[in-house]
Image (cartoon, helix red, strand yellow):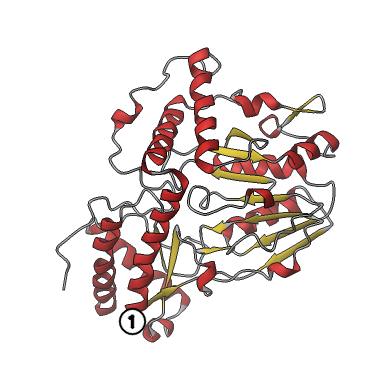
Amino acid sequence: MKPTSKPQRPFFSSGPCAKRPGWTTAALDGVCAGRSHRSKPGKAKITEALNLSRAVLGLPDDYHIAIMPGSDTGAVEAALWSLLGERGVDVLAWESFGEGWVTDIVKQLKLTDVNVYKAGYGELPDLSKVDCNRDVVFTWNGTTSGVRVPNGDWIAADRQGLTICDATSAAFAMDLPWSKLDVVTYSWQKVLGGEGAHGILILSPRAVQRLESYTPPWPLPKLFRLTAKGKFAAGIFQGDTINTPSMLCVEDYLDALRWAESIGGLPALIQRCDSNFGLIADWVAQSNWAGFLAQAPESRSTTSVCLSVVDPAFQKLSPEEQAAFTKKLAALLDKEGVAYDIGGYRDAPPGLRIWAGATVEADDLRALLPWLDWAYAEAAAA
């Protein structure tokens, strides 16, 4: 039967993600509009955003944090172009964005001493093969596959190389072992539901040492330059952004960070993600048609939850028919106004992708789940 209750906020997109509960445009009333980002009040806003990020994430005091242009992608690119080439690289890929970093390293930077460890959607590469005396590039949470690394135990504490971690759908949602991570990136538009276009770059002292001891052989675009005259450009990590940020977006990010602090900080954010995922997991356990794309329970993402159709009748369809079927599922849910933007990523196997991050309310997920069953029955009967 068609459910009668609908989610109050049907926003389950994996990016940009749902705004924090209770958000309205009034959250932007304190924006430093019409002023330079380098003015005293403008820089104060940026500095506050960096300090609050540090506090909520629990960053070590000697780690550096900066706002970067180009969202998470820009932050990762700045790290790859500025740091790689000093030694061999191990790069991991098990979904679309990891594949993008492989392309950058092999085809754009044209590094030759590269080990690429790949796995298909739903799986992880063999982490035991990674040599942490080389530089290591990986995503913590595969947003397009719903697969995450279970922990940082596979990263050597006494490593000689740098670990460069794209954590865009993991930061603020998962417990990141900072002592094992030398470079971490994320975007505001994921777990905290901020606006797009800006990224965050976090560097350990080891990463700073690499910046000052190694100069890449290739030209560096201005937007990627993290040094000045061979020295670490510390000002970038103290609020002097490389280019002009949107002060509206800064204000929105500040609002999200203040909300995070008000509910209990990082532990509360993680708990909200875990609880939301638990609701979906309980539903999947009872479903006769839906399963997780991620095969191993310990590596299932608690934010970008990717679902496959396991119904034998669906498995008999051609790939094109499967893709059309899951698109119809998402379209039915969109038309009913119960779930927006939950189709699987374009390069991923056909399925659904539901964001379960900290800004999503549990009651909205509870209301959504019966609609998934209804939509599947409707699509199957058509």
Q: Within 10 Å of the Cα at label 1, are there few (<14), some (14-19), or many (20+) other Cα atoms?
A: few
> In the image, is residue 80 above or below residue 305?
above
In front here: 236 or 219?
A: 236
Residue 293: x and y, percent?
Answer: 48, 71
What's the amino acid at mark 1? Asn
Quadrant containing the C terminus in the rendered view: bottom left
Residue 303: x and y, percent?
Answer: 45, 57
Residue 360: x and y, percent?
Answer: 34, 52
In front here: 27 or 378?
A: 27
User: Is residue 327 in view?
Assistant: no
Quadrant containing the N terminus in the rendered view: bottom left
Residue 198 is left or right of residue 127, and the answer is left
Secondary structure under tag 1 reads: loop
Q: Which residue is mark 1?
A: 288
Q: Residue at x 33, y 30 (%)?
A: 27
Q: Residue at x 52, y 13 (%)?
A: 40
Q: Residue at x 45, y 59 (%)?
A: 304
User: Is residue 277 in view?
Assistant: yes
In front here: 108 or 339?
A: 339
> In the image, is residue 236 above or below residue 193?
above
